[in-house]
Image: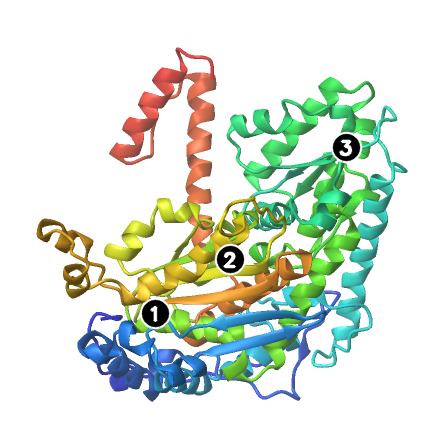
């Protein structure tokens, strides 16, 4: 079912070519061999091991054995008690993870844990933590977890750990100092007005991650107080409407612009940056040099390009090639604009929450490890049960942009067609992730989830509201009403409603078939204490690590994104054609018939309209 019915893999085993580990060096010039660490079999894939066939057989039984319907499994109290995990963190916080509504038994989970052992998961996790260059196609380490480590943390697992951590905190200290200067009015605009607005220019990971955190904290009481009188906006789309909507009610003299681009060459970001630069220069009295150096700062690895743009050396905040864009919200990419808006103090709590889960992920046993279990369930649902989509359903309006961020984190990471060794993957990798906050989503796509396609889902809820409301005469508070749906929907998906149920309820015969719910729709529930900066960091890290777990099991590189590049390359050709046609009237050439026809229609209309 999950892999087109293929049953035998013994003839498809691949030789295991061990690659030596190379650790990150702060100067990016010295390659440090990890001779003290044994090289894990980087080329092994889940299809190479005997556990794969056992899991295939187990998956088949879930489609053929009626006793494995969730309606029956969920009534097994011993089974349900064994399919839960709880993570305790400081100040009485808890994360309860219940996956008893997944289509698994205790035996299924043991097979999945055996699969993780067989592919060398713990070795791969240790290599990631130690700074091995596990992003082999780009020869880079993957160390976004280091961004969350506190000062003085004992990062002994990496030979270069102290140097890396020192560099990370050097940038964090710069962000703390600068954000406080801006927030207290010490650093002000060119005309002497304090900065009340921050306009953040970036796209992809430079936008989705910071925006998710911004939205998540808007109603948090501490963050709300810290951001009083301030505005933070994100300019991502090159569509001129986005620029118009972001700037139309801002005073340029009170606006600080943060341009985020690792290379400072991202086409959309740099066009938006030049557009905003012109907006500032046209609106503020002074020279372009003075305006840009005072009102624009950068987050980038390319210092010469930032200087060429006009940004002051002192206002360039760096990050490192071991931080991928979609994993960069804990770097200056997110930390700078969010500290300017919410304060560095609030963002330190966010980083502490993420670090708490990093420690849980790297140190907790597999069977108690929430990100690992989530990742194994993702592999089970997609590779073995054949479910190609996954819903992220936060029952918290503040998390309205969380699904979009995780969509990028997961789909850009795990949407791959070849393994680390370049051989084809014999099954699909990655899921189509989507979601909306409850209860809004219930009135949108839950119909499909209940009676159409099977969509495994993660329900995320909180015991305490960010803001509580209780109206006299109402049976429950607004938050309890929200959470009533959080508890009810997973059961409705799992149990469904049978024809016999409908007959007993007296439903009219002509409506019965329409009101049958098959049930057997898998889901997990994550119940956290409260949603604040610390919890937002925890939630982010849980899902970042889940993505890595699935990639390790599949034997793919979750940390490159070559699929993003092809469209960019073709767009350059189109851009050149548009420039030539508009400036010299050149005919459309070099494209297929469909693209040529559309381009000609577009250019013909543009010639008669104001574009």
Q: Looking at this view, is 180 or 517 the one in front?
A: 517
In front: label 1 or label 2:
1
Q: Secondary structure at mark 3?
A: loop
* Residue 16 position within the rendered picture, expressed as x and y whole percent measured from the top left: 42, 84
Quarter of the figure with residue 158: bottom right
Q: Secondary structure at mark 1?
A: helix
Q: Residue at x 28, y 27 (%)?
A: 597
Q: Residue at x 30, y 30 (%)?
A: 596
- Between the C-alphas of marks 1 and 2, the distance is 19 Å
Q: Secondary structure at mark 2?
A: helix
Residue 132 vs 276, above or below: the answer is below
* Residue 553 position within the rendered picture, expressed as x and y whole percent measured from the top left: 43, 76
Q: Looking at this view, is 336 or 381 the one in front?
A: 381
Circle 1: is it few (<14), some (14-19), or many (20+) Cα within 10 Å?
many
Residue beneath label 1, please? 381
- Between the C-alphas of marks 3 and 1, the distance is 47 Å
> Which numbered dot is residue 196?
3
Circle 3: is it few (<14), some (14-19), or many (20+) Cα within 10 Å?
many
Q: Looking at this view, is 518 or 349 the one in front?
A: 518
* Residue 162 position within the rendered picture, expressed as x and y whole percent measured from the top left: 79, 73
Placement of the N terminus among the 4 image quadrants: bottom left
Looking at this view, name the residue that lies furthest to the right. 186
The mark nearer the N terminus, 2 or 3, is 3
Residue 262 vs 521, above or below: the answer is above
Circle 2: is it few (<14), some (14-19), or many (20+) Cα within 10 Å?
many
Residue beneath label 2, please? 409
Q: Looking at this view, is 441 or 55 the one in front?
A: 441
* Residue 340 position within the rendered picture, expressed as x and y whole percent measured from the top left: 76, 44
Quarter of the figure with residue 386: bottom left
Left-right relation of 556 to 153: left
């Amino acid at each position: 079912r999950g892999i087109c019915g293929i049953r035998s893999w013994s003839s498809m085993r691949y030789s295991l070519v061990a690659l030596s580990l190379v650790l990150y060096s702060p100067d990016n010039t010295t390659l440090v061999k990890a001779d003290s660490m044994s090289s894990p079999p980087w080329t092994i894939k889940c299809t190479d091991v005997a556990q794969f066939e056992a899991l295939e057989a187990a998956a088949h039984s879930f489609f053929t054995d009626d006793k494995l319907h969730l309606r029956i499994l969920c009534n097994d109290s011993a089974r349900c008690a064994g399919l839960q995990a709880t993570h305790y963190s400081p100040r009485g916080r808890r994360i309860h993870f219940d996956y008893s509504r997944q289509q698994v038994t205790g035996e299924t989970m043991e097979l999945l844990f055996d699969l993780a052992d067989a592919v060398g998961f713990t070795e791969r996790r240790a290599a990631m933590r130690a700074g091995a260059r596990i992003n082999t196609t780009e020869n880079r380490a993957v160390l976004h977890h280091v961004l969350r480590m506190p000062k003085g943390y004992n990062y002994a697992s990496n030979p270069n750990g102290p140097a890396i951590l020192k560099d990370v905190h050097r940038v964090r200290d710069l962000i703390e100092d600068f954000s406080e200067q801006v927030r207290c009015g010490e650093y002000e605009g060119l005309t002497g007005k304090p900065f009340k607005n921050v306009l953040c220019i970036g796209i992809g990971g430079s936008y989705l991650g910071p925006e998710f955190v911004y939205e998540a904290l808007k109603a948090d009481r501490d963050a709300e107080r810290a951001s009083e009188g301030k505005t933070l906006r994100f300019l991502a789309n090159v569509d001129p409407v986005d620029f118009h909507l972001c700037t139309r009610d801002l005073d340029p003299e009170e606006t600080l612009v943060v341009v985020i681009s690792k290379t400072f060459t991202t086409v959309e970001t740099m066009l938006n940056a030049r557009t905003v630069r012109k907006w500032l220069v046209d609106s503020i009295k002074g020279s372009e040099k003075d305006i840009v150096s005072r009102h624009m700062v950068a987050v980038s690895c390319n210092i010469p390009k930032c200087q060429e743009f006009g940004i002051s050396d002192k206002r360039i905040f760096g990050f490192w090639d071991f931080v991928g864009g979609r994993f960069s919200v804990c770097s200056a990419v997110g930390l700078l604009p969010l500290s300017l808006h919410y304060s560095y103090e609030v963002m330190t709590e966010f980083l502490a929450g993420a670090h708490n889960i990093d420690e849980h992920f790297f140190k907790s046993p597999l069977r108690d490890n929430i990100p690992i279990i989530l990742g194994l369930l993702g592999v089970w649902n997609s590779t073995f049960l054949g479910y190609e989509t996954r819903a992220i359903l936060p029952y918290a309006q503040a998390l309205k942009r969380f699904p979009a961020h995780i969509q990028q984190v997961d789909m850009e990471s795990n949407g791959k067609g070849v393994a680390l060794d370049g051989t084809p993957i014999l099954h699909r990798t990655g899921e189509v992730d989507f979601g909306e906050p409850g209860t809004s989503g219930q009135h949108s796509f839950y119909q499909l989830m209940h009676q159409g396609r099977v969509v495994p889902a993660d329900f995320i809820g909180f015991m305490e509201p960010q803001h509580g409301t209780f109206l006299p005469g109402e049976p429950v508070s607004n938050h309890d009403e929200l959470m009533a749906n959080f508890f009810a929907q997973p059961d409705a998906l799992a149990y469904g409603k049978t024809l016999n149920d409908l007959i007993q309820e007296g439903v009219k015969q002509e409506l019965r078939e329409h009101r049958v719910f098959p049930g057997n729709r898998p889901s997990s529930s994550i119940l956290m204490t409260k949603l604040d900066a610390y919890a937002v960091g925890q939630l982010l890290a849980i899902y970042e690590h889940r993505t890595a777990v699935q990639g390790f099991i599949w034997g793919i590189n979750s940390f490159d994104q070559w699929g993003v590049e092809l469209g960019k390359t073709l767009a350059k050709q189109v851009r050149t054609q548009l420039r030539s046609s508009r400036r010299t009237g050149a005919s459309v050439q070099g494209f297929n018939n469909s693209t040529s026809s559309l381009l000609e229609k577009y250019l013909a209309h543009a010639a008669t309209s104001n574009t």
